[in-house]
Every structure is written in structure tokens, then in C-alpha cells.
Image (cartoon, rainbow, N blue to C red):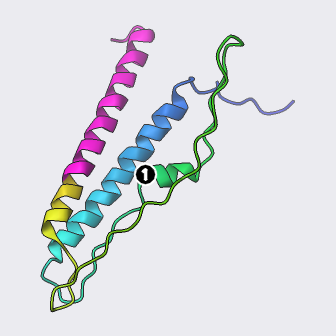
Amino acid sequence: MPPTTANPAPAAAPLMQLLRDRMAWTDLRQTLLATNIANADTPGFAPRDLAAFGTALSRRQVLLARTEPTHLAGAPPPPPGSAPEPGQLRAPDGNAVNLETEMAHLADNQTAHRVATQLYAKYMTMFRTTIGKA
């Protein structure tokens, strides 16, 4: 007799995993941006950043589940586009950190993380309501 497996995950599980991945990505990006700011006066330091989350996501295969025959079939995602990288101006000591740019990146990252955590919390509330634990 083959070993039994656990019940399949709920339909929202891929979405929950995507939200967890997004939160992990914003956490890692926060660390990189903080390192950039901390090294704003380090001679020869070049700031680093992660590839856009959409680029990382486009490398993964995410398929839509068609749970009902009357649902429309999902369209494949568009091919990933490449965004031009901005040129890095360097100070006379070779440092390329621009504090205004880094602070703008931090604000964008904070917003992305907040959206992901709020969506995650909403879905957890829905699941609790569904099973009667609200």
C-alpha cells in the first residue's frame, strides 16, 4: 500500500506562498538598502540592490488553477522586460551611494512589505472565519 499523503493545500496556498516570498524579498532588500546607507561614506563603495520581485517571479512557473469548467482559462504572463539600470555617479572618493535614491528605495520597499503583510493577514482572517475560529 502506498504511503498516505497529507490533505492537499487549500486553493489559496500558492497565493500565501507568493506573499511569504514577497515578504522575504522585501526583508532581504531592506538589509541591502540599510547596508548601502551605512556605507555612504565608505570610499569606493558601490550600492547593491536586488532584481525586481517581478523579475524573480517571472523566472518561476506560476500556473493558474482552473477549478471550474466554466472559468476562463488564464493567459500566460507576458515575457519579462528588462529595465535599464541607472548610471551610478561616483564621488571623488569612488563612493556611488546617493542617499536620496536609497531613501526612496526604502520607502518603496516599506510600502511593498506593508501591502504583502496586510494581504497575508486578510487571507488568514478569511481562513479563520471559514473554519469558524474568527
Which residue is pictured at 26% across the width and 39% down the height?
114
Does 125 appear above or below 57?
above
Q: Disc 1 on helix, strand or loop?
A: helix
- Along the viewing direction, whichever of 89 and 59 lies nearer the viewer: 89
Quadrant into which the C terminus falls: top left
Amino acid at pointer 1:
Phe
How packed mark 1 is, by other alpha carbons closer than 10 Å (few <14, some 14-19, many 20 or more), is few
Magenta stretch: dominant secondary structure: helix
Q: Residue furthest top?
A: 132
Task: Name the residue carrying label 1.
Answer: 53
Q: Quadrant of residue 96?
A: bottom left
Q: Quadrant of residue 66?
A: top right
Image location (x, y in percent) of residue 17? 49, 38
Quadrant into which the N terminus falls: top right
Which residue is pictured at 16% across the width and 92% down the height?
93
Drawn side of residue 63 relative to residue 101, left or right: right
Drawn side of residue 3 relative to residue 95, left or right: right
How many numbered dots are placed on residues in this image?
Answer: 1
- Along the viewing direction, whichever of 134 and 64 lies nearer the viewer: 64
Which residue is pictured at 36% across the width and 45% down the height?
23
Q: Residue furthest right?
A: 1
Image location (x, y in percent) of residue 128? 39, 16
Which stretch did the figure color magenta? Answer: 107-134
Image location (x, y in percent) of residue 118? 29, 31
Does 115 appear above or below 27?
above
Image location (x, y in percent) of residue 31? 27, 62
Which residue is pictured at 19% across the width and 50% down the height?
107
Magenta stretch containing residue 124, yes or no?
A: yes
Does 2 appear above or below 58?
above
